[in-house]
Image (spheres, rainbow, N blue to C red):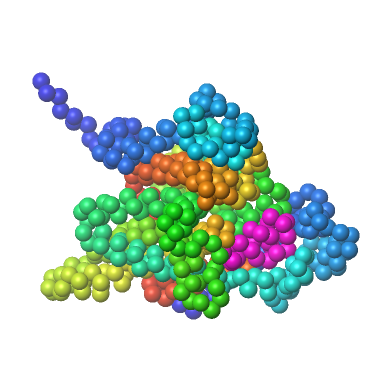
Amino acid sequence: MNEVNTKPLKERSATRNLVSHLMKDRLAIIGLILVILVTSSAILAPMIVPHNPNKINVRNRLKGPSVENWLGTDQLGRDVFSRVIVGSRIALQVALVSIAIAGSCGLLLGMMAGYGSKKLDGILIILFDTIRSFPTIMFALAVVTLVGPSLNTIILVVIVTSIPVYGRIVRTQTQALKHNEFILAEKAMGASKLRILGVHILPNVIGPLLIIASMDIPVVVTIEAGLSFLGLGVRPPTASWGSILNDGYAFIRNTPWLVIAGGAPLILTTLGFTFFGEALRDVFDPKLRQEVL
Amino acid sequence: MTYYLIKRLGVAAITVVLAVSLLYGMIHAVPGDPLSVILGPRATPEMKAELNKRMGLDKPFVIQLGTFFVNVLQGDLGIDVFSEKSVSEIFFGQLPFTVSLIFLAIGWSALLGIPLGCYSAVRRNTLIDKLTGVFSVGTIAIPSFVVALYSLLIFAVWLKWLPAIGAGKEGDFMDRLSHLLLPSFAVGLGWVGYLARLVRASMLEVLGENHIRTARAFGLKESTIVLGYALRLAILPTVALLGVGIGNMLSGAVFAEIVFARPGVGKLIYDSVITRNYPLVMGSVIMTTILFVLFTTVADLISAFLDPRIRENL
């Protein structure tokens, strides 16, 4: 007998929805492949690099791509391919750490603004808007001048500038939920604010937040690479895609492969995470499409 | 509208005051003597004494901040510690370069992005629509400084079609323009995608509305309906976005100016970061922030003027 799928659409699990969406969406598949590629090269970096990424060999400097050095060597004779692989670690590390911290703070502050008193909401919103009134790079430059360039400075800047974005999203969602019947019922039964926020509001706002946060990965990767490109991010000899671009920029006329090698992984990573993130959003929360656009 | 105007301007003023206080307060949040923090490694005792006198750093923080605001309101952003010129003079000397870059970038990206989005919405699900979709997401995602570096490599180094660095000779319009093309391409590319996407989405919404159906029922020409009725409404969200967009473009302009070694605000700030010239950095960042808030406010006011529904949402 042929079995017919009688389950209504709603009951199909999220994973199955995702898989069936992915099968139809070629861009999402490309995105997924790129994400897997970048993530696995970041995790496996120490095992898969063909050379020590920081080993200087001046006699072998600025060589073109060859069997030995797939992407050539830089001005200190270091293997560019190995540096690109190790660079994926820095990129994803900064993205994950800063987005996780900013996401948690944004979640907390956003719920406070959305559920708390009107006064608290007003204060938090003005604070959020103040921080958002700085163009990110300008703010980063001001902070770097004061505290000096380092990986932690970049993480700090990303956290401070992202909290308002997440906070505002969580606030809007919390406000929308606040007057729902199930919350009012809980309130009538005498549930504490903490319980309502933690048990009822949190599970409902965390989904959209996770999607927005995952779509922010390419943005943060870009900020890290950008600051490192300006020489204001990671300190030498640490390899980052931005610092490879910085090295390459100085020699762009004679050795173009350095710039190409530093830029390509950035393009692939940002495209991969964006394509995949958009597919995730369309599957899990199509309503968000309008909010982010 | 008057109520909205006053309220929106009030919010803008509070934002600017808070932003400036935050930037000023950061000097004190960093561990160490503020004078050494501001002046960097090259501080001599004389320079420290002079700056202390100017900024009153030994006075309570609130008084310092008050003095600072009074100075800013008088257009005095401080003195560059190295060249001893006034910060505002240096800043406004560089501003035209950045403004021309950003306006050219907005101009070409709007000229391309808006029709592209409009066309995609009208010819939905065709090949061009799908390609535009991929192109939009792609150009939004790719970092503008990578676009700048690659276009420098391709069009200036390899093909030698356009000049690589500088802003061109003063007074020679064509030379200036040719020096602007690559940087504005890099700054604007992401915006073509962004605008196309935004216009497509709001166009689709508008095309489904009743008055468009009525216009169709009256047998109006399709071009009149699309351009005369739908696009006029669909363009509204774009206006509001352009304000925010200018802020993002400023970030893009910083990179474009550095990659193409062009004078401008971005290059100015970057150079002063490298020399740890904090008064110049702070002054310029404050000015760009004020300009940014001004642009977003004006954009909001224009869209509120065009669309009364927005006024209720503040």
Position of B88 relative to A182 (above/below): below
Q: Residue at x 85, y 63 (%)?
A: B47
Task: Count how many numbered circles sit on residues in the image.
Answer: 0
- Residue A179 horizontal/vertical position (percent): 43, 51
Magenta-colored span: B262-285
* Quarter of the image where one finds residue B276: bottom right
Position of B173 relative to B143 (above/below): below
Camera-nearest residue between A220 and B183 = B183
* Quarter of the image where one finds residue A12: top left
Which quarter shows the C terminus of chain A? bottom left
Position of A213 relative to B296 (above/below): above
B269 with respect to B184 (left or right): right
Viewer can see residue A98: no
B17 with respect to A132 (left or right): right
In the displayed orientation, state which residue is furthest to the left. Answer: A1
Q: Residue at x 30, y 62 (%)?
A: B116
Camera-nearest residue between B50 and A20 = B50
- Residue B102 horizontal/vertical position (percent): 49, 67
Q: Residue at x 25, y 62 (%)?
A: B119
Position of B238 relative to A274 (above/below): below
Q: Is residue B8 one of those drawn in magenta?
A: no
In the displayed orientation, state which residue is furthest to the top. Answer: A1
- Residue A133 horizontal/vertical position (percent): 57, 61
